[in-house]
Image (tube, rainbow, N blue to C red):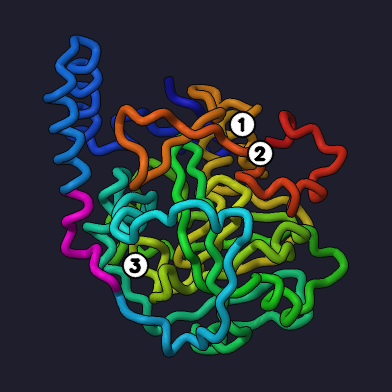
Amino acid sequence: MLIKTRNQGFQHPVSSEITNPAVYLERRHILKQLATGVAGAAMASWAARQAMAQSSPWGSRPGKLAALNFQTSKVDAAVTMEKVTPYKDASTYNNFYEFGTDKADPAVNAHTLKTSPWSVEIEGLVKKPGKWALEDLLKLSPMEERIYRLRCVEGWSMVVPWVGYSLAELVKRVEPLGSAKYVEFVTLADPKTMPFVGSRVLEWPYVEGLRLDEAMHPLTLLTFGMYGEVLPKQNGAPVRLIVPWKYGFKSGKSIVKIRFTEKQPGTAWNKAAANEYGFYSNVNPNVDHPRWSQATERRIGEDGLFTKKRKTLMFNGYEAQVGQLYAGMDLKKFY
């Protein structure tokens, strides 16, 4: 069934549009094999699929962060006892729909992205609008390494050491007006270097948004690297957002514009399917996605196909730090 949105002529994609048809059919085949007891063949197919992603020639490390003012190192105490996801998994299994709709596509296709020169434009309800060159953003505040969980709405998770600094440092520098209530993040949409821009999967450019107090929270990270190195192109180079208590799609990649607004911005997935993807998109195991449960998750790089799933934590395990932001709100209504 096609779900109409507020944009005339724009349609929410069916499964075969979101996933490469060959991979989609392969998964169907695996499920059929499992249902008939042919587990060995299914495991072999799954392993081959994972090996193809991890052997991508574009999954190599892009370089150290020495030039990025990487001065301090902090870890999130909430996850220091958890195993960090291997780099090869975090850099080859992710969503970046501008480069394809399968998890392995970004690592294969994102080599075409041009990250230099790069700038981020600040506009809207601020006293100091303007354009920030990447070099100036890098020098704005000392870098920190923060080990954060990343939880995807599709039911998988990772633990990744991200490198950056609190977005609040930039927000304070541009001085939002008293009327500013939200922050909108606009990402690059260049069909010349991003082969899937223009597809029907989403409206382009990809847009995300936060309430101003969410953007100002110390955990919200303006991110330039991971694993002590420059962000790989497939992970959102050269600058992206990380909001660890929300589902991964809230953390926009390859940001080119930050806009301060009084009204709640329309975001990419909310426009595509408002009944499935709310504006807040906080990790809440008590609110199911309309088509699947959010109560459990599979840890990439650690859990095998038949390993028992983990229990999903409220606010992705950051309830003590961010729960007060939503005091008194109906979290089933504001999902």
Q: Earlier in the sequence, mark 2 or mark 3?
A: 3
Q: Earlier in the sequence, mark 1 or mark 3?
A: 3
Q: Is residue 53 magenta?
A: yes
- 97, 7: nearer the viewer: 97
In x, y percent, where is residue 70? 51, 84
Label ID, residue 285: 1
To which residue does mark 2 refer?
314
Please give left or right for residue 126 compared with residue 309 in the image: right
Query: Disc 2 and disc 1: Cα gap in Å?
Result: 6 Å
Label ID, residue 233: 3
How busy is the neighbourhood of tag 1: few (under 14 within 10 Å), some, or many (20 plus)?
some
Q: Which of marks 1 and 3 is in front?
A: 1
Residue type at mark 1?
Pro
Point out the image quarter for the N terminus.
Answer: top left
The answer to whether one can see residue 165 in this image is: yes
Q: What stretch is highlighted in magenta?
A: 52-61
Q: Which of marks 2 and 3 is in front?
A: 2
> Is residue 43 positioned above or below 187 on the image?
above
Q: Is the magenta stretch mostly helix, strand or loop?
A: loop
Q: What element carries label 2?
A: helix
Q: Residue at x 75, y 60 (%)?
A: 212
